[in-house]
Amino acid sequence: METRQQGLLDPEPLTEVDEEMVSEVDLYNTVTDEEREEILSELTKLEEEISTLRQVLASKEKHHSELKAKLGITPLSELKQNFNRSWYDMQTSTAYKKTSETLSTAGQKTSAAFTTLGTAISRKFGDMRNSPSFKSFEEKVESTVSNIKTKVGSQGGGGSFEEVLSSAAHASAQETPSNNLSESSDHERTC
């Protein structure tokens, strides 16, 4: 007395006959044979029209190219003209103008900052050059150069440059008392 329900939850697998029936059923297509023939006929006409339009378009494009060639308009000149037009459009756009103004302002501010920095560095170098430490260093260099010139002149070219430089450095080191260095260091600490 058990009644068997057919449906999605059927425990038995489909047979080959069932599979063929399912594949032949088109749930979305409820077109009659007459309507199908009518649609196929319309589809054929549309394909013919499309083919005709493609031929007409190809003919018109050929004529278009011939006219351009007579006027001397080349693809390169067209590209150049399009590029120039696009460049002009971009330059006249609001976004470009705002960006240009912003970059200009930033450039001016950067230039002013570098000018201020350069002035500050120049001032520091000037202050440093007038410091006692720099003057002492400058005097030592002048003394060493003077000693080298004297040694080279007095030896008449008899010694090598390294020997003269070494002896001048040694003489310069002996001329400078060590007190002088500590005095200049004390002076720098108080400044």
Image: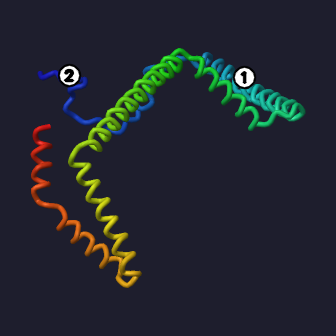
Please determine whether, in this image, residue 160 is positioned above or below residue 143: below
Query: Residue furthest toward the front?
Result: 154
Q: Please name the residue shown 36% across and 78% down the image.
A: 154
Query: Residue furthest toward the bottom?
Result: 158
Query: Residue furthest toward the right?
Result: 70
Please determine whether, in this image, residue 128 is positioned above or below residue 27: below
Q: Please name the residue shown 46% across and 24% down the image.
A: 103
Report if the CB atoms under discs 1 and 2 are less than 8 Å apart: no
* Residue 185, x across and y down, in percent: 12, 48
The answer to which of marks 1 and 2 sits earlier in the sequence is: 2
Please determine whether, in this image, residue 34 is positioned above or below residue 53: above
Is residue 84 found left or right of 128 in the rendered image? right
Per the image, label 2 sits on a secondary structure element best described as loop
* Residue 190, x across and y down, in percent: 10, 38
* Residue 48, x across and y down, in percent: 74, 27
Residue type at numbered disc 1 = Lys
Q: Which residue is mark 2?
A: 5
**18 or 62: nearer the viewer:** 62
Could you classify mark 2 by the number of other residues whose Cα lies within 10 Å: few (under 14), some (14-19), or many (20 or more)? Answer: few
**49 or 4: nearer the viewer:** 49
Q: How is the image coloured?
A: rainbow
**191 or 87: nearer the viewer:** 191
Give the image quarter of residue 34. top right
Q: CA distance from mark 1 to mark 2?
A: 50 Å
Q: Please name the residue shown 51% across and 22% down the image.
A: 100
Q: Which residue is mark 1?
A: 45
Is residue 23 found left or right of 166 in the rendered image? right
Residue type at numbered disc 2 = Gln
State which quarter of the image contains the N terminus. top left
Is residue 191 found left or right of 156 in the rendered image? left
**151 or 83: nearer the viewer:** 151
Total numbered circles: 2
